Image (cartoon, rainbow, N blue to C red):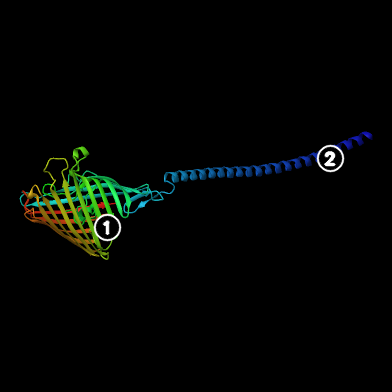
Amino acid sequence: MSHLYLLGVATLTLTSAGFAGSDTNADLQARLDAAEARISELSAATNANWLNDARADEIRGLVHDVLADADTRASLQGSGATAGYNGGFTVGSADGNWSMTINGLLQTRWTNVDNDAAADETWGFTNNRSWLNFSGTIAGDYGYDVRHDLGTATANPNGNNGDWANGSLTIGDGWDLTMGSFKMASSREALIGDENQMALDRRANGFVGAQAVYNVGQGVSLDYSSDDLGVTIQVVDNAGVASAAANNSSYSYNVRVEYLASGSWGQFDQFHSAEGGAAGTLVGFSYTGNDNGNAAAGGTSDQNLWNLDVQMQWGGSALYVSYTDGSDGLAAANDFNQTQIMYSMDMGDNWEVYARWTDNDGDAGSMTSVGVNNYLAGQNAKWTTELTMDDRAAGAASDVTTIATQLQFYF
């Protein structure tokens, strides 16, 4: 009896233990699953935070690099440099004390010449003028002007006669001083830039054998300007020699006085008078003389030249009249006087017609030109076509008719 009792108790005990173990395992498994889920959740959150931190570090680094680059650029630009286009490509300091303006000109032309004394007509293409110009301010109170001709002027008698380079400073009370090489102020036509001429070329108005559209001198120039009066006094090496020893104390001097009767100075920087523009009148007088210095007598010591010209604009039409007289005390045969009359009219739609007549008593005739300008983009892009009839019969030439068309690009 006792054995059966013990067996029953043992069986009940093992059965209870089995059920208890099964419940414990299920509970442990449930806890394990919950822990794994929590671990996965925490791991995902950690990864996300790590990515956010990495992005933040990258953004902070990028911002730092950009700020450093901006500081470098500001330093290179002189703490606020300016750049753009204003009558040329310009760059300068924010205070305006340092600046540079870059200008350039290209004139390319097709020309056909019919000379009655020649067997055949001739034609061809030329690059009549190409140059770069650099000008600006130095330390606020000083200026510079450097012209580099790209090799066309010396080969072309109607070119711009070479380079120049000069520095200038303001004296005060309207006076400026310039030293170096510069254009001689022999006439208004000479002073107006190549890009702002009316016709294809200037008319020569110098002594026989040395006629030039303008001269470039090496020396000093004193300039005065007021509301209605301009004065230029220039002293340069005679014949433009390169050294003081070679010059032998010879010199040329030039004085020009201009009176602005009406209008503004700026409008007379070109011959073109656009429809609706301002009216004005500018009168000028120039006198040039030479001295041989320590050189032997003769040469150009007794040569002198004077010019009187008037430039008028009426807001759609313009007139230029110039008279030049040259006297050579050592060779009267070189004496001359020349008259030039040029008139233009704006036809609208960027078209303009002009006519010019020139007579020099040293020649046996005169020159007459008629032409048309198409201002594609003002003076910056211009197309000119011109017909010139030359009956001066100089040398072998006789009744020369020239047709030329030119594209001009200026910046």
Q: Nearer the viewer, residue 346 or 183?
A: 183
Q: Is residue 75 left or right of residue 157?
A: right
Is residue 21 placed above or below 338 in the rendered structure? above
- Which amino acid type is marked by label 2? Ser
Is residue 7 placed above or below 311 in the rendered structure? above
Q: Could you tell me how far apart the alpha carbons at marks 1 and 2 are, in whole angstroms?
A: 111 Å
Q: Are marks 1 and 2 in contact (CB under 8 Å)?
A: no
The label number, if any, that marks residue 304 in the structure image: none
Q: Residue furthest front?
A: 294
User: How far from the left and from the top, in percent, is residue 344?
Assistant: 19, 62
At a point 26% along the width and 54% down the height, the residue shown is: 381
User: How far from the left and from the top, in percent, is residue 241?
Assistant: 19, 41
Q: Which residue is mark 1?
A: 378
Q: Which residue is mark 2?
A: 16
User: How far from the left and from the top, in percent, is residue 32?
Assistant: 72, 41
Give the quarter of the image for residue 278. Answer: bottom left
Which sits earlier in the primary sequence, circle 1 or circle 2?
A: 2
Does the rendering let one see residue 147?
A: no
Is residue 188 placed above or below 2 in the rendered structure? below
Q: Nearer the viewer, residue 251 or 271?
A: 251
User: How far from the left and from the top, in percent, is residue 263?
Assistant: 27, 63
The N terminus appears in which quarter of the rendering?
A: top right
For label 2, the SS is helix
- Which amino acid type is marked by label 1? Gly
